[in-house]
């Protein structure tokens, strides 16, 4: 198999002043095709899959206040995929299913990203990140005749939200303590192309925190950390196996620990 592609990137930046910039960008990308070398039971007609290409458009604004206490970035994006590579069940001539990497005809992904950083004082820092994504199969008739056109792509939640806070306590010649916490929210999502009810991963939110000590030399760091502090029960995967039985993979429960890092050359 021999393939070639021309993948340009073109962008334009406009500076309103030294603190505010608007931009537009277009790029084209390419992912080569290949072979399902691990799964050949479905027959040679499903052995190879084609190349994937995408045209991506982005427009955005980056701005910082004069006193550098607030930074705000926002971007809108649209990506149009042709021959999007997607895993799916394929049935061979004996009626046996296997998982193959194949090509969906067309996919559209559009959305908005926002990043905000606020530093109201030297010791405080707050972050707010929001992402909205609408990822749809515009056209997708799979290998066994199922029509997934209009379905949402798997593992493409509509909303992601992150809120973080950090406080730094100087300790003079002894170094500093940094207290930080983060709250993350992920909306519901599908785990496969069919968007079947059995494959819906419910929305969830997680709370993490850490306390870090670093000496004045900044040569090492000692961190006390905790993840999923509310011990939230959530799923990473929901679906069915080859036998039709439901399969659920649970997320990591509350964990905590102590970490040490040494920085060479510090």
Image: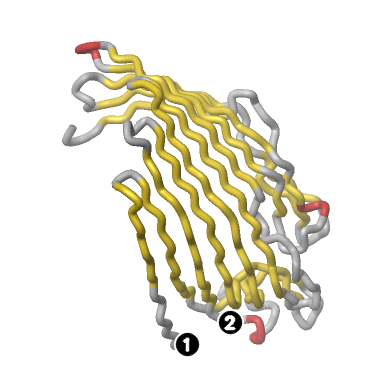
Query: Which is nearer the N-term, disc 1 or disc 2?
Result: 1
Comparing 255 with 197, the one in front is 197
Q: CA distance from mark 1 to mark 2?
A: 10 Å
Q: Give the x, y percent position of residue 108.
A: 63, 67
Query: Residue lying farthest front?
Result: 16
Q: Give the x, y percent position of residue 253.
A: 62, 30
Specify how the rendered protein is coloured: secondary structure
Q: Do the CB atoms of the residues marked 1 and 2 lie less than 8 Å apart?
A: yes
Q: Give the x, y percent position of residue 246.
A: 80, 51
In the rendered structure, the answer to whether residue 196 lies left or right of residue 131 reads right
| SS category of the residue bearing label 2 | strand
Pointer 1: residues within 10 angstroms few (<14), some, or many (20+)?
few
| Image quadrant where residue 171 sits | top left
In percent of the image, x 64 and y 46: which residue is there? Answer: 159
Q: How many marks?
A: 2
Q: Which residue is mark 1?
A: 1
Q: Is residue 178 visible?
A: no
Q: Which mark is residue 259?
A: none
In percent of the image, x 72 and y 69: which residue is there? Answer: 89
Q: Give the x, y percent position of residue 195.
A: 77, 59
Q: Is residue 138 visible?
A: yes
In percent of the image, x 75 and y 79: which residue is there? Answer: 92
Q: Which residue is mark 2?
A: 48
Q: Quadrant of the C terminus?
A: top left
In the rendered structure, the answer to whether residue 255 lies left or right of residue 149 reads left
Residue 206 position (above or below residue 29): above
């Amino acid at each position: 198999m021999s393939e070639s592609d021309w993948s340009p990137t073109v962008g334009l930046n406009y500076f309103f002043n030294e603190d505010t910039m608007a931009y537009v960008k277009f790029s084209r990308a390419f992912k080569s095709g290949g072979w399902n070398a691990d799964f050949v039971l479905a027959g040679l007609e499903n052995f190879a899959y084609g190349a994937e290409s995408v045209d991506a458009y982005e427009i955005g604004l980056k701005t910082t206040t004069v006193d550098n206490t607030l930074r705000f970035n926002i971007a809108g994006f649209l990506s149009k995929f042709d021959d999007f590579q997607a895993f799916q069940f394929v049935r061979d001539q004996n009626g046996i299913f296997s998982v193959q990497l194949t090509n969906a005809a067309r996919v559209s992904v559009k959305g908005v990203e926002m990043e905000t950083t606020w530093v109201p004082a030297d010791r405080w820092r707050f972050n707010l990140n929001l992402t909205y994504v609408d990822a749809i199969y515009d056209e997708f008739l799979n290998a066994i005749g199922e029509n997934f056109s209009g379905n949402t792509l798997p593992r493409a939640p509509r909303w992601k939200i992150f809120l973080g806070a950090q406080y730094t306590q100087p300790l003079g010649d002894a170094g500093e303590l940094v207290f930080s916490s983060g709250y993350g929210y992920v909306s519901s999502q599908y785990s496969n192309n069919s968007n079947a009810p059995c494959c819906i991963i419910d929305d969830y939110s997680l709370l993490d925190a850490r306390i870090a000590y670093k000496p004045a030399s900044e040569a090492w760091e000692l961190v006390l950390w905790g993840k999923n502090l509310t011990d939230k029960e959530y799923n990473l995967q929901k679906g069915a196996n080859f036998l039709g039985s439901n399969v659920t993979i649970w997320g990591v429960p509350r964990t905590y620990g102590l970490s040490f890092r040494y920085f060479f050359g510090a």
